[in-house]
Image: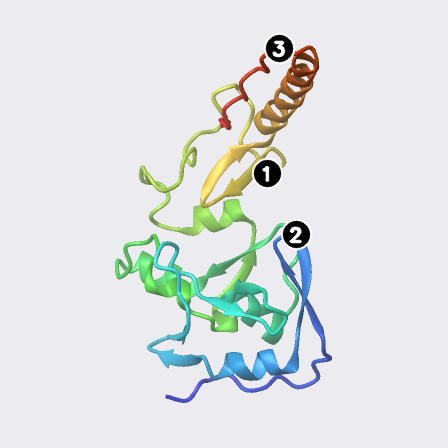
Amino acid sequence: MTSLLTFPDGLRFPLAMPAGRRIVEISESDVIRFIGMTEPDGDCLRFTRFVSKKSGYGYFGLRCQVNVLAHRFAYTVWRDPIPANMTLDHLCHNAAAWAGLCPGGPCIHRSCVDPWSLDVTTRLLNQRRSPHQPRADLNHRNTRKDECDHGHPFDEANTYWWHGERHCRACRAALQRARRKRGAMSAALAAQGKHPLPELPLEED
């Protein structure tokens, strides 16, 4: 099948794109290769190379030897740069899910890279848009709670997402402070020839 994507006019290379905590460069050859890795599939534009069995998302390898999420690459090239701390919502998934045609989770829509079927949004709003979210979803810890186990609010300022799970920033900061303090105490004990304290477990809300 022929891809619906064509080379975008007016792009200047290299094109910057966030990848984790760093900025990577998209080259002209990256865009050409990417077009050849897509094909129409119903209302979606499917990414035909590596798709994670765990998450359902496609990953595209840039010439600079960095792997990026395929749908974020497509949006950046054919639409606009993605603002910091924002995510992309697959509108094709929402339509199918509300129609009862998609079970949610790592579904086939996550490998869709149609730039015009993606919407920039916050992670919280992305979760709330799904018809599956109001139910008790075991894949999204803490989603239905208004506050963490220590009473901190799950609002925009105090919430971050990791591997699809919601966590409390205040609890994480407290844990990091405790770990630093415990590390300093262990170093002092070790300098005296005593056994260091065991590390604190990586637990937080």
Element assignment for label 1: loop
Q: Answer above or below: position of 44 versus 197.
A: below
Report how far apart the C-alphas of labels 2 and 3 lie in the structure.
38 Å
Disc with the residue nearer the chain's start (1 vs 3): 1
Disc with the residue nearer the chain's start (2 vs 3): 2
Report how far apart the C-alphas of labels 2 and 1 lie in the structure.
20 Å
Amino acid at dot 1: Glu
Q: Residue at x 56, y 23 (%)?
A: 152
| Mark sitting on residue 201 | none
* Residue with the mark numbered 2: 21
* Residue with the mark numbered 3: 194
* Residue with the mark numbered 1: 156
Amino acid at dot 2: Arg
Crowd around label 2: few <14 · some 14–19 · many ≥20 (10 Å): few
User: In the rendered structure, are the residues bearing label 2 and label 3 in contact, judged by CB atoms less than 8 Å apart?
Assistant: no
Amino acid at dot 3: Lys
